Image (cartoon, grey):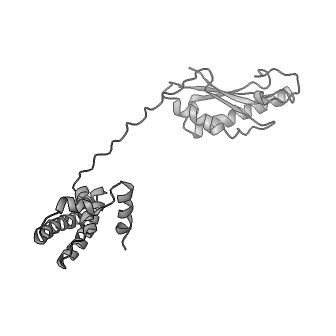
Amino acid sequence: MTKTNVLMPLALAATGLAATPALAQENWAGMDRDTLRGQVQQRYDAALAATLDPAYFNANDPRYIWASEAKAQCGIALGYLKSNTRDEVSLSKCWMAYDRMMQVPQPRVVPAPEPTPAPVCNRELPGLIFFEFDSATPGSDASEIVQYVTQNAAACNWRSFNVVGHTDTSGSNAYNLGLSQRRADAVASLMSVQGISQSAISTSAKGEEEPRVPTADGVRELQNRRVEILVNN
């Protein structure tokens, strides 16, 4: 049994079009055998031609499936008629599949694409990246934050940036100043890799001088271990 022969009964049932003998009786009742045979033969020939038409099977046209079913069922009905037998089930399926084959499918409506969202131009602080204690390695979300900056730079008219490193108050001032510079350099390097020209990036280090969350000296505070990407122009 072919794949089409397996799928078609399911398709018929799913669409509420399961064949019944009454359908053939209604349309072909009272026809003499020769006239009925001519009607069935006409449908068989048309279905056969459709299954060989590239415009049907190359375009994934659903009428190709119905043509295949009509060819099969009308062929069965013809076989019965040759032996002087009216098989109402195959006649009904032949008529119905041919009718569906002749229905031109409605074109699929393709929804309009969603509009591209406007860039969020946070000029004051487009990027904020946090660091682990005593580390100059950007956090796991740094790449995503830098990508946001690089992707929106042109639309937001961000032409140059100042990348500012900060630390918390744990450690000496001199050490923290150097650490904050290394943090700024790391983020600037990441920006350069993602498409921002090096000539558009400047870096500076604040050490522990400008905490985001004021604390006593010697306190480890994540919010203060950061790099801020600022827009210069």
> Is residue 95 shown to the viewer in this render?
no
Q: How far across and down, in percent of the image, does residue 188 sit?
A: 64, 34
Where is 81 relative to 123, above or below?
A: below
Residue 186 found in image quarter: top right
The image shows residue 195 at horizontal and vertical percentages of 54, 37
Q: Quadrant of the N terminus?
A: bottom left
The structure residue drawn at horizontal position 21% and vertical position 67%, both measured from the top left corner, is 48
Q: Nearer the viewer, residue 222 or 196?
A: 222
Q: Quadrant of the C terminus?
A: top right
Residue nearest the observer in this picture, 133 or 24: 24
Q: Is residue 90 visible?
A: yes
Residue at position x 25%, y 63% from top?
92
Number of labels in the image equals 0
Q: Looking at the image, which is closer to me, 166 or 197?
A: 166
| Residue 191 shown left or right of residue 3 in the figure | right
In the image, what residue occupies the spot 88% across and 23% down? 217
Of 42 and 61, nearer the camera is 42
Query: In this view, which residue lies farthest toward the front?
Result: 30
Q: Is residue 107 left or right of residue 49?
A: right
| Residue 28: x %, y % from top left | 17, 62
Q: Residue furthest bottom?
A: 83
In the image, residue 164 lies at what x, y percent?
69, 26
- Does 11 sit left or right of 93 as displayed? right
Direction from residue 52 to residue 207 in the image, left or right: right
Q: Going 14% across and 64% down the picture, which residue do you hit?
A: 30
Q: Is residue 144 above or below residue 59?
A: above
